Amino acid sequence: MSNRLWELGAQGVWESSGYLSAYITEMEPGISDALNEYLASLQELFPRCHLGWEKLAVPKIDWVENWKRYYYPQPLSQRLYLLPIWERETAIPRGMQAILMQPGQAFGTGLHPSTQLCVKHLERLISMDHPVSVLDVGTGSGILSIAAKLLGARRVSAIDTDEMAIQIASQNADRNKCAIELFHGSLEKVLGEYDIIVANILLGVHKHLGSHYRRLLFPTGILILSGLLASEGDELQSWIAGLGMQVISSLQDQGWLAISVSHKIAS
């Protein structure tokens, strides 16, 4: 939803107490219809949720600057420390690695539980002593790709259907001196196999990409899936079993779920 609001011209988007708020300077013709259409599609995915929106007049605020107050230096995981680029001189705890970020209009600030759960899974699986290859599906700001590289991944590839996201991910990778292979387009264009695939997107999109996950994952590889609601656990288990795969670990935070999956070993 956040990404859709950015696409419709929002200058600021933030989440609080079950609400998503966005600042749009002018409601251009068609924005209301676009919002209604998008909410209707989400309602089909999440029939138990009540979705709606309203328009409120607010005082003129510099939302670009105001947003920075909520994006501040903080731990991203046990080994990684998030630093917005305007706080790059901030000292970080000893033994932690800084990850410099400017998310811009791409999804992936590092503050959402679904992103942090992905990083925790990556941290469990990657080390400098055991370099692996990683594919980041729906990279957004590039934060998961950069995290994987900083944690010790040998090779990292990332893909997104949003061209702006690819541009932002490339800039963030350069800021962190990380070599990441970036693809713009659909997953069909990615070839080869990876030790780890990480994807932080909705369950409906995961289902659509299931055959590609299987195709691109080494037989001994691990698939990390996030962007999932804890309440979707049963549906998720059924779908994974249908792929001939199995859940090997899971993490939850604030109602969000992220899992690690492997191919089933023939008995």
Image (cartoon, grey):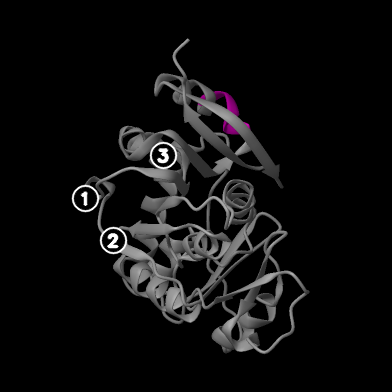
In the image shown, does 50 or 190 lie closer to the viewer? 190
- Region of the chain picked out in magenta, as a range: 231-235
> Is most of the magenta stretch helix, strand or loop?
helix
Residue 96 shown left or right of residue 119 in the figure: right
Q: Position of residue 82 (x, y in %)?
A: 65, 72
Reply above or below: 139 against 186. below
Q: Which residue is mark 1?
A: 189
For badge 3, the amino acid type reads: His
Q: Which residue is mark 3?
A: 206
Contact between marks 3 and 1 (CB within 8 A): the answer is: no
- Cα distance in 3D space between marks 3 and 2: 18 Å
Q: Position of residue 185 (x, y in %)?
A: 25, 57
Q: Secondary structure beneath disc 3?
A: helix
For badge 1, the amino acid type reads: Lys
Sequence-wise first label, 3 or 2: 2
Q: Which mark is residue 139?
A: none
Sequence-wise first label, 1 or 2: 2
Q: Any magenta on residue 172?
A: no
Sequence-wise first label, 3 or 1: 1
In the image shown, does 37 or 226 lie closer to the viewer? 226
Q: Residues within 10 Å of mark 3 (few under 14, many from 20)?
A: many
Reply above or below: 192 against 155. above
Q: Which residue is mark 2?
A: 183
